[in-house]
Image (cartoon, helix red, strand yellow):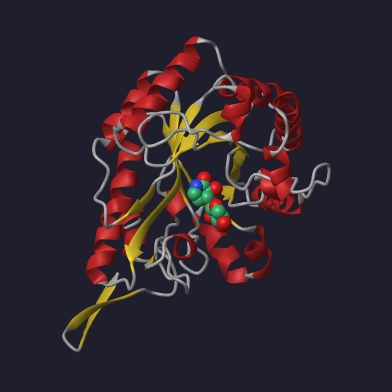
Amino acid sequence: MAVVVAMGIAVWQAPAAAASVPLKNITNRYVGSAVAATYLASESDYRAVLTREFDNVTPENEMKWGTVEAVRGQYDWSGADAIVRYAQRTHKTVRGHTLVWHSQLPDWVAALPADELRGVLRDHITTEVKRYKGKIRAWDVVNEIFNEDGTRRDTVFRQKLGDGFVADVFRWAHAADPGAKLYLNDYNIEGVNPKSDAVYDLVKTLRRQGVPIDGVGIQGHLSIQYGFPGEYRANLARFARIGVETAVTEADVRIPTPPDPAKLATQASYFGQLWDGCHAVSRCVEFTTWGFTDRHSWVPDVFPGEGAACLFDENLHPKPAYYRLNP
Ligand code: XIL
């Protein structure tokens, strides 16, 4: 990495190309990024960096219910198909995201009466998982089902089907593709806290009941404003001890804009701790970032005043965080 001093201020200058060895080749973990089908099709520089650096892709929106069946009975698999085809062509694995989520859920689903919702949910899972059978390494089966205090989030699924819907959806997904690893995915469960305690207890219970759950996805949406989550490694390790995989599924580290060298250094440290912890703990099998370039990150849209959360800047130059992972 080159640092030049201009007008007495150290300015970090990225070379145009990434490090000589791509990120995916320096680790035995899957290294992924969320990807958007539109940019994959329209931006060759975006596609080139993705292809070179990563060996897993997660569709950012293309497999969500609101995308694949916004109108009942009218399916749109175009984006999901394109990403899966790209992954097969470039020898990458796919993390399917996500089958059951209260967000980006079509209104028609939320409006269904309980008896009908159950059948529709089973059909949704069966249809989507079977469509990509054998092509998805791991599915985020349920997404964000807990509140911060460890109670269950009161979604339409819970209200109408009861907490037992979670065991059901894992069984349905497993029946549709017995080869795919099935995950529960959530945010703010990097460290040990009431929410990750609740995830831990539920996973332990489900395993004891013989429910086919293979892993816990730790999203990894961090901000340099809030400190690095405590007991991250201990948290990963306790999941390994109950026999499930973990994966960092959506890592990004937000910065209050504008970024400066000090903030970028803190960001690099956070990314580094996420990465090192995953490598230090057995059965943490994947490190996926939620997009790889600040050009297309979801962060500025959702967190006003924050941004620059990715490993590469808008011009696809690697940032200090990238070099922290791949020195
Ligand atoms: C986000 C996408 O990045 C945005 O494009 C979309 O508008 C909203 O959803 N946790 C998740 C992801 O599990 O699905 C979310 O993705 C980010 C938070």
Residue 79 % position (x, y): 71, 54
In this rendering, is residue 171 above or below 30?
above
Question: The N terminus appears in which quarter of the rendering?
Answer: bottom left
Quadrant of the image occupied by residue 4? bottom left
What residue is rendered at 37% in x and 41% in y?
Answer: 188
Q: Is residue 32 visible?
A: no
Left of 265 or right of it: where is 96?
A: right
Q: Quadrant of residue 326?
A: bottom left
User: In the image as oriented, which residue stretches furthest toward the bottom?
Assistant: 7
Indicate whether 316 appears above or below 321. Answer: below
**Which percent across, then down, holds residue 100?**
61, 35
- What residue sits 72% from the left and 30% below the top? 113
Which residue is most to the left?
Answer: 8
In the displayed structure, 70 sits above or below 113; it is: below
Instruction: Give left or right: position of 223 versus 98.
Output: left
* Relative image position of residue 2 (x, y in whole percent): 28, 74
As drawn, the residue found furthest toward the top would be 209
Q: Nearer the viewer, residue 28 or 132?
A: 132
Q: Is residue 132 above or below residue 56?
A: above
Residue 150 visible: yes
On the image, the x and y values in percent for residue 126 come to: 74, 29
Q: Residue at x 58, y 22 (%)?
A: 162
Q: Using the image as rendered, state which of residue 198 and residue 311 is in the foreground.
A: 198
Q: Is residue 5 left or right of residue 13?
A: left
Q: Residue at x 75, y 45 (%)?
A: 69
- Quarter of the image that includes the C terminus: bottom left
How many numbered discs? 0
